[in-house]
Amino acid sequence: MSSTPSRRSLNIDNINPHVKAAQYAVRGELAIKSEEYRHKLRYTDPPTPPEEPLPFDSVISANIGNPQQLDQQPITFFREVLALVEHPKLLENEEALKTHFGYKQDAINRARWLLKEVGSVGAYSQSMGAPGIRQSVANFIEQRDGFPAEKNDIYLTAGASSGVHSLLTVLCASPSTGVMIPIPQYPLYTATLALHDARAVPYYLDEQHGWDTNMAVIRESYEKAVAEGTDVRAIVVINPGNPTGASLSEWDVEDVIKFAAEKNLVIFADEVYQTNVFIGKFHSFKRALRILQQKEPGLYDHVELASLNSVSKGMVGECGHRAGYFELVGWDQEVQAQIYKLISIMLCPPVIGQCLLDLVVNPPKKGDPSFHQYHEEYHAIKHGLQQRATALYDAFERMEGVEVGEPQGSMYLFPTVRLPEKAIQAAKDAGKNPDDFYCLRLLDATGICVVPGSGFGQKPGTLHFRTTFLAPGTDWITRWTKFHHEFMDKYR
Amino acid sequence: MSSTPSRRSLNIDNINPHVKAAQYAVRGELAIKSEEYRHKLRYTDPPTPPEEPLPFDSVISANIGNPQQLDQQPITFFREVLALVEHPKLLENEEALKTHFGYKQDAINRARWLLKEVGSVGAYSQSMGAPGIRQSVANFIEQRDGFPAEKNDIYLTAGASSGVHSLLTVLCASPSTGVMIPIPQYPLYTATLALHDARAVPYYLDEQHGWDTNMAVIRESYEKAVAEGTDVRAIVVINPGNPTGASLSEWDVEDVIKFAAEKNLVIFADEVYQTNVFIGKFHSFKRALRILQQKEPGLYDHVELASLNSVSKGMVGECGHRAGYFELVGWDQEVQAQIYKLISIMLCPPVIGQCLLDLVVNPPKKGDPSFHQYHEEYHAIKHGLQQRATALYDAFERMEGVEVGEPQGSMYLFPTVRLPEKAIQAAKDAGKNPDDFYCLRLLDATGICVVPGSGFGQKPGTLHFRTTFLAPGTDWITRWTKFHHEFMDKYR
């Protein structure tokens, strides 16, 4: 029963204008259309006349880093333990678990420990997360960085996105609040700032130098914002980069910290891809900050850092479990009390996700019964990702007008594409940005869904798209190559 | 390493003032203190001198509806299935599941069906939730109400709280936006309005008549708000009530709908306690609206309803899984598109929680192999809750100065307490509200944590507290009775 529009309370012209202003292309028009195609392929076989069959037989969701949708298998040890904490009665017959289902003693022991820590995964935990699991996260950070971490500065979350949302909610005090955001960026940041009616202060990453941070550009952007009356309070760095795939050097990280110290900016280090590094190694902001604090006592003690991590990425890929954490370094205690209150309104992050986080930060060690299988699975996934990244990179290298740097990290490639004038005109005629137009045509012709560069931000006059390299096989890459060739021919 | 306060970017005086303004007592000072006591009891045995031992040996968290923290066992069928969807390799040996772990065929079949619907619980689902599970919810609503429900108007959430947050985010357009809130209320509502810098328009529930809605009071509150320039857009009804435990009659529900239709208000029906009804039966807003629409065609077609439900309450009590849904009835399609965009920024609700929701709305039916056990467990929990409610009610009836109505529904009792003048003076001297003071003393003396009425709102000059009746046994009720007696004696 449809309601009478004229008498409704809410309509598009009177709802929260900041919601309307927020942009989030990762799940936008293209993603919705790709879901419709997926549905059509699944439920109408053969299609009802006069409907034409689709020109492809599968949808490839390369628009979002969702490994297990694309057939990445979960890591066995993690899921073995999660099944036990979901259904503790299974623990009443350890022998049968071992004999019939291949369980090892360490999986069983870990499940018992987790149940002791959380009671039941059906009970609310503390709003910051179960203390024992926060301690596991602290231990992980200590081992990673070689510097102490404190469990009471660690907040478990329902994925990194929810952490970003909470922290920006506290930070955004007025419409003149500004946060420096890399461009291109994962659009969570600009969307969240739009929701809070605050200002994104964009700084361009350096495409010519592997999408590195460029301090001159950052400085210039900062000065410009301040001159315009923006109260710049924080700088976001995504490392390894999304959508760029860049992995920052130790010096890049240090330079950002020095700049933040000089300007009193909070650093948001989005480090969810910290294990997805193919070239060189990951350099955490926490470690770099502690080293600077040791080297030059007093100069960096006032720096406030929030470092975010997630179980959705890495070789784990457990997006659907919605789990992650952030660590606060150097934050005011009264501000932390307000963060606690804010997150307590939403009660707590999913408890089974907290258990999964514990497994991710403290996986089987050498000598543990489950270590061998864990190690094999982990490295097979890592190897597979790197292989697919390379295959896709090679295909782009051969495509006319497409340019992309060698894959360094994260789950994405973000190529530049130069389209013929006629294609740009055709996009204009269709009322689309040229990159939107290209991606829409790609989806319609091949079932491959990627995100146009406009969804992340790009220098005016340039065109990009972001694709994950998660989809298995190379068939889809062949489909894409063929499409690209035909597209370029058509509009040449 | 502490940072230098004067040079930090963020401090209590410059963060988002709306976060500071938000109040949420359910997890406030008392809850934090109770956790400290729990920690002390667990880790310091015996206490280090010169510390005194605590005068109680367990903490009773009666401040929050968290059944599984208080030893309520999860329903076996639900957890059997969840273990299988977490670890699908278990399905490779159905025989062993049946022989060694008591699995029945319907649990196995359901797990296979869920895995087909979601792919992997480690994959992001659609932002509104998996379509097959939304269809299950639609079927449940149809059966409950006898009127059709549409899966595309159903949004799965990470618990009802996150649904309320999303909907209020869209609705709150300016500082003059107003939402009518029952007093006393679950403080999620006022806290969320404070975060959005919108106005709570309070209407008092009628304590003399079992905490019913009183239309004269609602009308008066509405008129007053409008006269003050408030753009009143919605009315929240919590039925069965939190914290009051009231269960509304069909006529009460109809009256609210008629009022909302007259004033063009969106109805937020918080119906998370819909199965927790001891007296009479639950009357859903959706059904009442459809009946009114049938009876008087045209008069109610413009009504916008949002009905919220959750797996945290009922006999399910799976709070830690953070799952629920809301159904929108009569909302504008463009507004729904904005809601979709908003929730897509947070990607999706936890997928294992979505699976649990499917089980809750579609449990084993008569004739299914798992039905008998499910039915037994469900009714044992229901019976236990009712028994404990009655035991607590009887104890309050005997306490001096305490008055409370017969338990009708939800998980709470919300008694009035009249304290002696001296106690009120002692509270004043301690800088506390009298109800805060009483609850703090109760916690310090007995380990029982409840929430003062001030956390929910109460008529000036009255004092209340909210307690759940979830804690097992009667020992804690005896402790409380003894404390109350001594407290009254001390301050008489």
Image (cartoon, coloured by chain):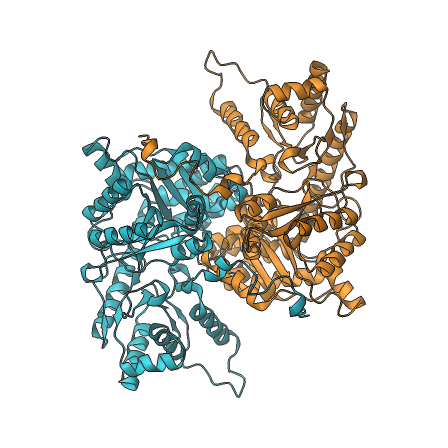
Chain colours: A cyan, B orange
Q: Is residue B340 left or right of residue A200?
A: right
Q: Residue A137 placed where, x, y %? A: 37, 39
Q: Is residue B39 above or below residue B353?
A: above
Relative depth, front residue between B370 and A123: A123
Q: Residue B279 placed where, x, y %? A: 79, 44
Q: Residue A297 placed where, x, y %? A: 22, 30
Q: Is residue A355 left or right of residue A276?
A: right
- Using the rendered image of the protein, determine whether residue A52 is visible from the camera's viewpoint: yes
The quadrant the N terminus of chain B occupies is top left
Q: Is residue A417 above or below residue A486?
A: above
- Using the rendered image of the protein, determine whether residue B269 is visible from the camera's viewpoint: no
**Quarter assignment of residue A109:** top left
**Quarter assignment of residue A439:** bottom left
Identify which residue is drawn at 48% across, 76% down: A41
**Quarter assignment of residue A388:** bottom left
Identify which residue is drawn at 41% across, 63% down: A26
